Amino acid sequence: ITVVTWNVGTAMPPNDVTSLLHLNTGETNDVDMIAIGLQEVNSKINKRLKDALFTDQWSELFMDVLSPFHFILVSTVRMQGVILLVFAKYYHLPFLQDIQTDCTRTGLGGYWGNKGGVSVRLSIFGHMVCFLNCHLPAHLEKAEQRKEDFATILHMQQFEGPVANGILDHDLVFWFGDLNFRIESLDICFVKYAIDSNVLSQLWEKDQLNIAKNTWPVLRGFQEGPLNFPPTFKFDVGTNKYDSSAKKRKPAWTDRILWKIKPPSKGLGTGGHRPSQGVLSVSQLCYCSHMEYTVSDHKPVAAIFAVQFASKVDKPPVEIYVADEWSRPEQAVVRYKMAVGFHRSSWDWIGLYRVGFRHPKDYVSYVWARSDDGERCLEKQLCAQVMFSEEALPKGNGEYILGYYSNTSSSIAGVTEPFQISLPRSEEGSSSTDSSGSSSEEDDSTLVLLAPKSRSPSPGKMKRHRSRSPSLAKFQGLILRPSSRDRGTSRSPSPQSRCSLPRSIPTIHLPHEGLGHHEVKSKELGQAAESPDSSSFYQTVQEQSGLRRVSADSSLTKADPRNLGLLPALRLEMIDQALGRRQESADQGYYPCQRMSATSPPGCGTSPKEGDSP
């Protein structure tokens, strides 16, 4: 298990995090899970609104980097700027069950989430493990406040289920984050001398967390590896130099990773048997900082653990059987068998994933696991069977994985080994793709708002457009094409290439011939829009002879944009383009509209009159 903590200081993600995740070493093949704790992710209101539409850029970055290594996002939780991400290799997913998250605010007396803790707990092969990412109060003199906040987090976070209701009830706890413990007594000159001379051991005994581990009962049993790396705070952003500002903060090991193994219970264990000794052991293989990252005033810290235990689970909850290759649509038959005690639901589904998928909702297509004899198959331990329709199957050649998604546990309960799909591409599908690709190059700065489509499995028609982002459930139809200069840095999903879009997005506009003067009241226009004949109020513009004219026969003239789900399609033009058209209109005797009502298009007169309101 690899654990990473990083206070990113509201910075944008770097381009490369492979060294931070130790993906460029041979250790990657042995890592089964990765937990990433971030603090101070940009959580200003405009950024949070964007993150409500799209997955935040940090999560997108880690999913993009880890998916080629077959790591899948198991769970994530966010509390303002504090984020926790847990990844695992895809073949472990059926053995990761009872996944729950929680968060506790401790900022401003518990009302603000800039400080506090977020956690993900889950059962790993039958053993209960909890990952806890914390951001505790800053400053040297706030050590007692840090203790109180940590105790509050442990007390407040409670989980459902028969076992491990509290954080410390888990068999194994990983506690990490910006814990903000400082170095006491020693002045800044001596601290920097010890760092430059590489005699870090002289600073350990004055580290507040080392002192607290021996004196605070709440920290009893927590372990940490030796601090053989320089203090990770505070640096000048963009450099490896410690704080050179007027405040000249003393360097400190604020970013830490600890773990705790639950001590064996006294007396008899469950079932009247004494608990076996040594059922779970942890060895720390690596504990280091990464000085190469300079986007924040903190350096990230990573640790790699070898966790050994006796597996309590031998078989996944659902076993899936499939042919080695699908070369014809009639071969797309899936047989599955549910284990005794598995809680099936009529909302369970089987997803078809490309090898390298990023999270459980990142499917190509799906089919409901609604076999008519499902209950009988579960009771008698027989195999149920479902089949993918020809329209739902991807065309072309590729490697895929099937996964059974349990709605009850909100996790994947069974997966297959990769298998091959080799279906001929249809001419219609390729032409659609070509037209989509050409249209995407025509206009970089277009915001297209389409009618919403469900991104979670739906009993309706199979959808062609899907999102790779797990947090777009409420804004399914939104497609954002960034401008060309932003496209290189954007980490938000860009699924427009997966669905056909028109080559030209119509612009709502009314010519001067068919409109009254400027002084027409917006209220009257609004009433016209609300009238039964309002369909004629919205008209489509066609490009003819260099001028924009209204086509009354267009399909959009009969459509009320309020019924499109969000808004009518809009063309967003660059400022210089808009000003150029404005100048052309002025040269030809036309004058642009001065304002746009929320309920009606603008009215454009032939000439401005003295005394008109803007």
Image: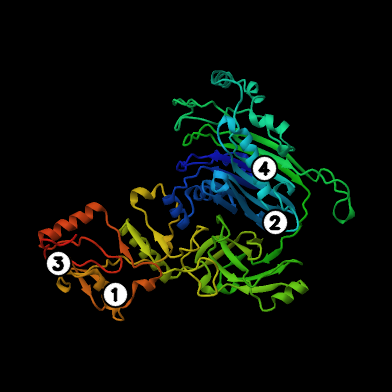
SS for tag 1? helix
Question: Nearer the viewer's eye, disc 4 or disc 1?
Answer: 4
The label on residue 605 is 3
Outermost residue to the bottom: 532
Q: Given contact means CB atoms under 8 Å apart, are the residues at marks 4 and 2 in contact? A: no
In what quadrant of the picture does the C terminus appear?
bottom left
**Chain-order first, disc 1 or disc 3:** 1
Q: Residue furthest front?
A: 109
Where is 550 relative to 8, above or below? Answer: below
Q: Amino acid at mark 4?
A: Ala
Contact, CB < 8 Å: mark 3 with mark 2?
Answer: no
Task: Write down the residue under mark 1.
Answer: 529
Between the C-alphas of marks 4 and 2, the distance is: 31 Å
Q: Separation of disc 1 and disc 2 at Cα?
A: 57 Å
- The answer to which of marks 3 and 4 sits earlier in the sequence is 4
Up the image or down, 205 lies above or below 97; here it is above
Which one is earlier in the sequence, the residue at label 3 or at label 2?
2
Q: Residues within 10 Å of mark 2 (few under 14, many from 20)?
A: many
Q: Residue at x 56, y 68 (%)?
A: 366
Q: Which residue is mark 4?
A: 151
Q: Nearer the viewer, residue 269 or 483?
A: 269
Q: Which mark is residue 95?
A: 2
Residue 395 location, x and y as percent?
49, 66
Residue 605 place in picture, x, y as percent: 14, 67
